C-alpha cells in the first residue's frame, strides 16, 4: 500500500503514559489484529517513521493504535503523536506483518508493555468469533484495564502481571498447545519465549512480533 493521508478521530488516555489514537481507515485499508502500520511525519525538517500495531478488533471504518511513551523523556516521534488532536492529518502506510490473528480456535497471547494493543485486539476478535483466548500481559503500570476486564467477563482468561516470575508461572499454567502470539519489546519477547520453552512448549509456528 502507498502512504495515505488520513484523519485523527480521537486521542484518549488509556492508562499510565499510554494513549490510544483512533484513525479513520483510508480507502481500501484493512488490517487484522496483530498487524502494524507505519506512521510518517516531518520533524525538524527530517522525515521520520515509526511502527504501531493495530489495537482494535476491526478496521472497517476506523482503527486504533496504542502508543506508550516515556513521560520523562518522550522521543520526538512520541511527542508528535501526543500532540495530535481530532481532525489532524497523519500519513499511514500498511498494514504490514504476517504474525496476526487468523481465526485460530485457541490462542495464547503473551504481551509486554505496548504489546497489550494487539493482545486486546486479538482477544476481542477471538471472543466475537466464538474462539478461546488467554492473555498473559506483563506491565509495571497496566493499561487498557477496562477492555481486559470486559474480555475476562466475556470468557477470556486474562492475567495482568507485574513481574517476570509471575509471567513464567502463568505461561506454565496456561500453555497447552494453543496458537502462540507474542508482542512487545525485545526483552519481553526473550522472557516470553524462555517461558514457553520452560513450560515444555514449542515455538515452531508461534507468531512473534518484536517492537525493537
Ligand atoms: C513491528 C513494530 C510494532 C510496534 N508497535 C508498537 C505499538 O503498538 N505501540 C508502541 O508504543 N510502540 C510500538 N512499536 C515501537 C515504536 O515503533 C517506537 O519505536 C517506540 O514508540 C519508540 O518511539 P520513540 O522513538 O518516540 O521513542 P521514545 O519516546 O523514547 O519511546 C517511547 C516508549 O517506548 C519505550 N521503549 C522504547 N524502546 C524500548 C525498548 N527497547 N524496550 C522497552 N521499551 C522501549 C520507552 O520506554 C517509552 O515508553 C513498534 C515497533 C515495531 C518495530
Image: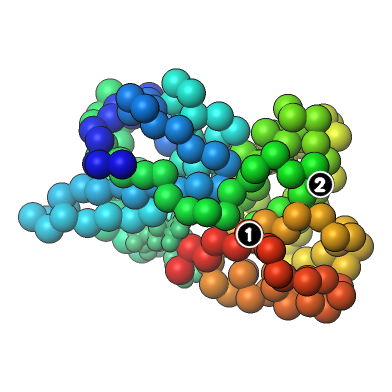
The answer as to whether callout 2 falls within 8 Å of ligand 1 is: no
Where does residue 103 sit, x and y in percent of width and height? 70, 39
Instruction: Residue 52: tell me if it is visible.
Output: no
**Side of 145 relative to 108 (left or right):** left
Where does residue 17 sit, x and y in percent of width and height? 49, 50
Q: Toward which corner of the image does residue 164 lie, by quadrant?
A: bottom right
Residue at position x 67%, y 33% in the image: 125
Q: Toward the viewer: 174 or 42?
A: 174
Q: Toward the viewer: 53 or 16?
A: 53
Q: Toward which corner of the image does residue 140 lie, by quadrant?
A: bottom right
Nearest to N terminus: mark 2 or mark 1? 2
Q: Which mark is residue 207?
A: 1
Helix, strand or loop under label 2? strand
Where does residue 88 sit, x and y in percent of width and height? 25, 29
Residue at position x 88%, y 68% in the image: 172
Where does residue 107 sit, x and y in percent of width and height? 77, 49
Residue at position x 55%, y 29% in the image: 58
Q: Which residue is mark 2?
A: 106
**Side of 208 relative to 63 (left or right):** right
Amino acid at each position: 500500500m502507498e502512504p495515505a493521508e488520513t484523519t485523527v478521530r480521537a486521542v484518549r488516555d488509556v492508562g499510565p503514559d499510554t494513549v490510544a489514537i483512533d484513525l479513520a481507515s483510508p480507502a481500501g485499508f484493512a488490517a487484522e489484529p496483530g498487524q502494524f502500520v507505519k506512521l510518517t511525519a516531518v520533524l525538524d525538517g527530517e522525515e521520520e517513521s515509526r511502527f504501531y500495531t493495530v489495537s482494535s478488533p476491526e478496521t472497517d471504518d476506523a482503527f486504533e493504535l496504542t502508543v506508550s511513551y516515556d513521560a520523562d523523556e518522550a522521543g520526538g516521534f512520541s511527542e508528535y503523536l501526543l500532540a495530535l488532536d481530532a481532525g489532524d492529518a497523519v500519513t499511514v502506510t500498511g498494514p504490514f506483518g504476517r504474525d496476526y490473528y487468523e481465526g485460530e480456535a485457541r490462542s495464547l497471547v503473551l504481551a509486554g508493555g505496548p504489546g497489550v494493543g494487539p493482545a486486546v485486539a486479538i482477544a476481542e476478535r477471538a471472543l466475537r468469533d466464538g474462539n478461546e483466548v488467554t492473555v498473559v500481559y506483563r506491565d509495571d503500570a497496566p493499561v487498557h484495564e477496562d477492555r481486559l476486564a470486559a474480555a475476562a467477563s466475556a470468557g477470556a482468561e486474562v492475567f495482568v502481571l507485574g513481574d517476570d516470575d509471575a509471567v513464567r508461572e502463568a505461561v506454565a499454567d496456561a500453555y497447552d498447545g494453543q496458537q502462540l502470539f507474542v508482542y512487545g519489546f525485545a526483552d519481553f519477547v526473550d522472557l516470553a519465549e524462555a517461558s514457553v520453552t520452560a513450560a515444555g512448549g514449542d515455538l515452531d509456528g508461534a507468531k512473534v512480533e518484536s517492537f525493537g
